Each structure stands twice: as C-alpha cells, then as structure tokens.
Image (cartoon, helix red, strand yellow):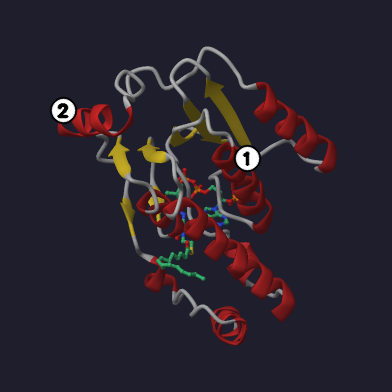
Amino acid sequence: MALRAALRQKCGLIGILSQPSSSGSHSRVSAVLVSQMRNNATSPKIKVDFNQSTGVAVLSMQSPPVNSLSLDFLTELCISVEKLEMDRACRGLIITSSLPKVFSAGLDILEMYGKSPERCGEFWRAVQEMWLKMYSSNMVTIAAINGSSPAGGCLLSLTCDYRIMSDNPRYSIGLNETLLGIVAPFGTDKNIIKNTHTCSN
Ligand SMILES: CC/C=C\C/C=C\C/C=C\CC/C=C/CC(=O)SCCNC(=O)CCNC(=O)[C@H](O)C(C)(C)COP(=O)(O)OP(=O)(O)OC[C@H]1O[C@@H](n2cnc3c(N)ncnc32)[C@H](O)[C@@H]1OP(=O)(O)O
C-alpha cells in the first residue's frame, strides 16, 4: 500500500501494478523493434508495450532459457530504454520477464570465458551502461521480479526505483556472484580488461 501511495504521489501510476499488460502499443517503439528485428538475425530479446493512456511502458525480457545478460541482450535493453527515455509521454517503466520462473540469471557466464580482451571490455562497458542508464533514468522504474534473479539480475532490479517480487519460496535473489569468483571490475578500461581476464582464467 505504501508503494502504491508513493507511486500515486510521484506520477499517478496507480492501477498499473494490477494490470501489467498494456492495451495499446506505441508506434515509435514498434518502429524501433521492427528496426531491431531487421538488424538482428535472431528474434528480439526485449518486448516493449507502451500504454498511451497511463504513460507507462512494460518491458518484458524474453530471452530463453534464463534472460542471461549477454552483450546482445544488454545492447537491446539499453536501446529500448533509451528510446522510451526520449519519449516525453513515457513516465513510468516496468521491467519484468516473460519467462516462467526466471526474472534474469544475471550476466551471461559465456561472455566471461575465452573471449578476447577487446570483447571483454565491450561486454563490461555494456554492463556499466545498462546500470547507469537505468539508475539515472528520468522515468519511474519498477522491477516486477516474477522469478529468480541472482547476481546481475539482482543488480538490474536494484537500478530501479521500486522492486516487487513474487511471493514464491522457490525464487531466489541476491548478489551471489562472488561464489563464482566474479568481482565486478572498476570503471576504467584497463581495470575492466585486467579484472575480466582474472575471471576467465
Ligand atoms: C562494470 C560494472 C560496474 C558496476 C557494477 C555495479 C555494481 C556491482 C554489483 C553487482 C555486480 C553484478 C555482477 C554479476 C555477475 C553475474 O551476474 S555472474 C552470473 C551469476 N548467475 C548465476 O550464478 C545464475 C546461475 N543460474 C541459476 O541459478 C539458474 O540457472 C536459475 C535459477 C537462473 C534458473 O534455474 P532453472 O530454471 O532450473 O534453469 P537451469 O539452471 O537448468 O538453466 C537453464 C540453462 O540456462 C543456462 N544458464 C543459467 N544461468 C546462466 C547464466 N548466468 N549465463 C549463461 N547461461 C546460463 C544453464 O547453463 C542452462 O543451460 P543448458 O540448458 O544446460 O544449456
């Protein structure tokens, strides 16, 4: 109830949480997705539904099996958020998963093994861009965590203004990446590459 009151106060988003799927789509966002589909051989990993009447967009992560945050995924996510950010009609963003049981498994582990230093740098820059873009967003952002959300998945939800998680004891969330020997690198390119190499060796 406190959350609903806060949302009502901040930007009149009451009612959104109880109707996560939108009734209408936004033509500009659709154009972006069509363009992404043209550029990507694979199907889109992100689906955006914008509801004109509420000013709220629902961004659904749809990258089976576990919405892992690969470079492609992060790039698509950032483009989607950036486009919504530029739309003054869009005041709120709900991030959720269209997969059963998993919100996001965090960073794609395969991006951290056997890759060139250049690719590692590109990947970690994309991670950084994602959380900076989300954290500094002008939109009211909500993570609707409808499944497990370890490590980078947890980070993604922490970048949002609000988090709501399904009440299911089988879903876990937390910053468990050190269990895998992964330490998030510092901000400079030199350290990013050095640190990522440490992880993959
Ligand atoms: C530059 C940075 C600057 C600033 C950072 C700021 C702050 C720092 C704060 C935080 C840093 C955050 C760092 C994060 C690092 C990471 O995220 S590392 C990844 C950690 N993730 C995990 O350990 C998750 C492991 N997976 C699971 O626990 C389960 O898979 C999950 C509960 C998600 C789902 O379970 P289930 O439904 O049973 O599915 P499966 O386990 O059977 O998995 C299905 C297939 O998916 C593959 N998979 C799972 N997770 C990943 C992954 N993370 N990456 C790639 N692939 C993954 C799994 O292997 C299965 O594949 P298969 O079917 O066998 O081929």
Q: Quadrant of residue 62?
A: top right
Give above or below for 105 relative to 15: below
For the point 45% across and 58% down, the residue is: 152
Give above or below for 79 relative to 201: above
For the point 48% across and 56% down, the residue is: 106
Question: Is residue 187 visible to the viewer in this orientation of the structure?
Answer: yes
Q: Is residue 157 left or right of residue 27?
A: left
Indicate yes or no: mark 2 CB to ligand 1 under 8 Å. Answer: no
* Type of amino acid under label 1: Lys
State the residue position of label 1.
83
Give above or below for 67 relative to 7: below
User: In this orientation, which residue lies closer to the viewer: 191 or 182?
Assistant: 191
Pick out the residue farthest to the top: 23
Indicate yes or no: mark 1 CB to ligand 1 under 8 Å. Answer: no
- Percent from the top left, x then y, of residue 24? 56, 14
* Type of amino acid under label 2: Met
Q: Secondary structure at mark 1?
A: helix
Q: What is the quadrant of the C terminus in the image? A: bottom right
Q: Quadrant of residue 25?
A: top right
Question: Is residue 64 visible to the viewer in this orientation of the structure?
Answer: no
- Percent from the top left, x then y, of residue 187? 52, 78
> Viewer-nearest of labels 2 and 1?
1
Residue 1 disc label: 2
Q: CA distance from mark 2 to mark 1?
A: 31 Å
- Percent from the top left, x then y, of residue 176? 36, 64
For the point 57% across and 54% down, the residue is: 69
Q: Quadrant of residue 15?
A: top left
- Percent from the top left, x then y, of residue 63? 61, 41
